[in-house]
Every structure is written in C-alpha cells, then in structure tokens.
Amino acid sequence: MSSIADLESEKEWYYEKISEAKAQIKKLENNHYSLSLFKNDATKSSESFYSINSKKNSYLSDIEELKKNSRMSKRYYKGMKGVLDGTGAKIVLVAYSVLLKNVKSKLDDYIKKINKLEDDISRYYERIAAINAEITSLRAAEKTNWTTQQA
C-alpha cells in the first residue's frame, strides 16, 4: 500500500507529464500550421506552373497551322514543344507531386502525434483522479484509525 506522500509525488509526476505533453502539442500545432502554409504556397505554385504551361501549349497549337508553310515555324514549334512537353516540364510536375505528397504525409504525422499526446493527457488525468480517490480513502482510513485509537 502506498503512502499519501508517495501518491502525492506520483500525482505531481503526472502533472509534469501533462505540462510536457501540452508544450509538445503546442510545438506540433505550430509546425503543422507552418507546414500547412507552405503546402498552400506549393499547391498554388504547382497550379500556376501547370496553368502557364497549358496556356503556352495552347499558343503553340496556333503555330501548328503555320508550320506547314514555314521552316522557321516548324523549328520554333519543335523546340517549344520539347520545352513545354519535355523532360524538364515533366520533372517539375513530378517534383511538385512528390513534394506535396511528402508534405501531406508529414501533416498527417503531426496530427497523429498530437492525437497520441492528447490521449496520453487523458490517461494522465484519469490516473490523477484514481490517485486522488486513493488519497481520500487513505486519509479516511487514517482518520478512522486515529479516532479508534483515541477512544
């Protein structure tokens, strides 16, 4: 059977763990917020790149008619088509895709860690309530023993 002092000490330990968990949650929430802002910027940038590339491709399709009559138009068309649909553009699109996927994964990881810490805090409070009940029981038993000894 634990003494009241041991139980009070254990209770303080749980309060410290709660404080640490809350500080960690705050840090994770700040990181999540910051990364969310970055994700929004990266998403806008990706959409902008895709939009600009698509517009340039549509302009290039206007030149396609001219290339039948002009060697210069043929060369320009071929070169620009290579730039707009080539490896570089594909690499940029894949890079955005991979970046956004990794950012989403990290955001999900932050949420999981926050949820785990919140569950830990709940368990700590439950344990504190049990300790308080045990302390109350011990104090009642001490009072009963003291009263019995006085009689």
Image (cartoon, rainbow, N blue to C red):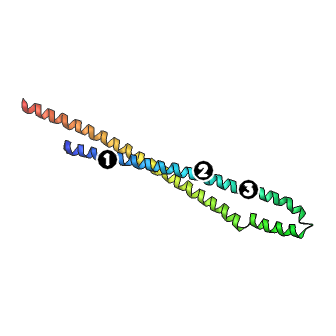
In front of the other: label 1 or label 3?
A: 3
Q: Residues within 10 Å of mark 2 (few under 14, many from 20)?
A: few
At x 27%, y 38%, the residue is 132
Q: Which mark is first along the chain, 3 or 1? A: 1
Q: Mark 1–mark 3 contact, CB under 8 Å?
A: no
* Residue 70, horizontal then vertical, whole percent: 90, 68
At x 52%, y 48%, the residue is 33
**Position above or below: 117 against 83:** above
Left/right placement of residue 122 relative to residue 60 reads left
Cα distance between the residues tagged 1 and 3: 54 Å
> Which residue type carries mark 3?
Ile
Q: Secondary structure at mark 3?
A: helix
Left/right placement of residue 120 relative to residue 75 reads left
Q: Secondary structure at mark 1?
A: helix
* Residue 48, horizontal then vertical, whole percent: 69, 54
Residue located farthest toward the front when viewing the structure as drawn: 72
* Image quadrant in which you'd find residue 71: bottom right
Name the quadrant of the C terminus.
top left
Which residue is denoted by mark 3 in the rendering? 52
> Which residue type carries mark 1?
Glu
Q: Mark 3–mark 2 contact, CB under 8 Å?
A: no
Which residue is denoted by mark 2 in the rendering? 40
Q: Residues within 10 Å of mark 3 (few under 14, many from 20)?
A: few
Q: Secondary structure at mark 2?
A: helix
